[in-house]
Image (cartoon, helix red, strand yellow):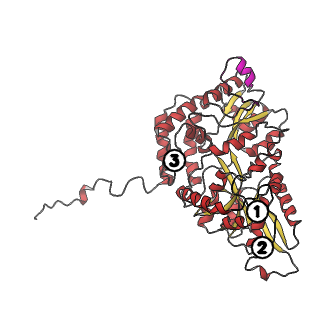
Amino acid sequence: MRALFPARAGRSLRRRAVASCALALALTTAACTGDAEPEPRPTRSPDQGQSSPSEPRRITFGAYGTEEEVAAFQSVVDSFNASSTTRQVALKSWPDHESALADVLAGEAPDVFLTSRIDLGQLVEAEALQPVSLLLDERGVDFGDRFSRDAVDAFAMDDELQCMAYSVSPMVVYYNTELVDFDKMERRGLDVPTADEEGLRDRWTLAEFGAAAQFAARRGDRRGVWIDPTLQGLAPFIYSGDGQVFDDEDEPTSLAFSDDDTREALSETLAILRDPTLTPTNAQLARATPVQLFKRGELAMVAGFRNLVPELREAEGLDFDVLPMPTLDSRATVGDISGLCLSADSEFTGDAADFIAYAVSDAAISTVAATGYIVPANTQVAASPEFLAPEEEPASSIVFNASIRYMVVPPFIDQRVELVEAVTPLLESLVTAPGVLDLESTTEQIDEVSRTVLSPEGEEEPGSEDPDPSETSSETPGE
């Protein structure tokens, strides 16, 4: 699963909010292209005169993903290259965004590269990017209804659009449609999510989620649900219960698991997740991952992102669909957003911007969306058959699109990896430890451990300590 909590950034989410407002104002002058595709065209950068007129200008595009995703990116590159003899794009690929980030920060950035929003702060801090706002505006890229506003805003920082939103993937619940049979449940008088006129179930409560888990686990070793006992796995339930994961949305100094609303949300959620009759046994987890159990029909529900779809489609005998994350008080989820960035070191800025404009066009992004791995930030393609794939599972792919507006974008934090490593053992105990749970004590401990990572020097305010008696003068006034 993709990471939720941003890597070392040194920037606060407050700047994102300010940047969003400034960016929205700046983009009101952007050209609206309607259904027209941005045509790739050569644009000279100041230093492009150095290239020989007889040789095409060469730029590189870096992307990460599975073999199928990389092959789709190659198709996009080939289509772009076929449109011009004056510039050529070469594809560089990485297995994951961590590898991509390492190369970019090491000074080996391609002219254009794919990145995760969790890396944005660190890339801006390293001055590795050229903002793309004006460059894409000049190329007629429509920032209005044609792209997810939430995804675009996520890449706004320092009053600029730092990268162009490419894909967005909210966390949803995958469920086995044979094990979770809502029609049969309804006939038995059980709580089920309401279907609309077209049969789409696009919202459900925590009680309905629990009822589905109980129904699926009613016999044998079959289990109802698995949610990863991690910050990412628990965050949607906390936010939905009007709790908070962090103590501050801009510059967190601690987790907020001991907050009253957070505890209440956890209490309701853990009543399901800690039920040993509903969740996989230790023996089951020792021989298979939750996703493997789901594919085998031994587990009815698992939370995940869009990148699970191709793997599940290949699972023999598996019928599945998706639902949003369950609602406690308000709708909420988490997820990952990726964008296309322009390297600060690119010698061919104009050509690189042309490629970004082409890569986010309907025709180009449809090629990648057809692989099933991504949810396009391009709203036209996200509503198209290339993404929705009505003849394939999941039948309710529109749930991914609907969930985007409820994604909570977390603050940038400096020590993401250290924080996860520090609190994960406690979170695992919170969710999976047998016996009676002392929720108050455990949540206080989680917050305390998080402070040693997020604010190691701020646990005690300066001057708050009692004075050392040995350092207190014994002299009296006038002596």
Element at label 3:
loop
Toward the left, the furthest residue is: 478
Which of 125/405 is in front? 405
Viewer can see residue 254 = yes
Q: Is residue 118 left or right of residue 465?
A: right
Q: Which residue is mark 2?
A: 43
**Please, what secondary structure does the residue beneath circle 1 have?**
helix
**Image x and y of residue 330, in percent:** 57, 37
Dot in front, 3 or 2: 2
The crowding category of the residue bearing disc 1, from other C-alpha atoms within 10 Å (few below 14, some 14 to 19, many at least 20), is many
Instruction: Give the CA separation, mark 3 to mark 2.
Output: 45 Å
Q: Tell me if residue 219 can be seen.
A: no
Describe residue 447's horizontal placement relative to residue 384 as left or right: left
Tag on residue 317?
Answer: none
Up-down: is 446 above or below 107?
Answer: above
For mark 3, what is the residue?
246
Q: Quadrant of residue 153?
A: bottom right
Residue kind at label 2, given as amino acid type:
Thr
Type of amino acid under label 1 = Ala
Residue bounds of the magenta highlight:
181-201
Q: Magenta segment: does it hold 430?
A: no
* Disc 1 target residue: 357
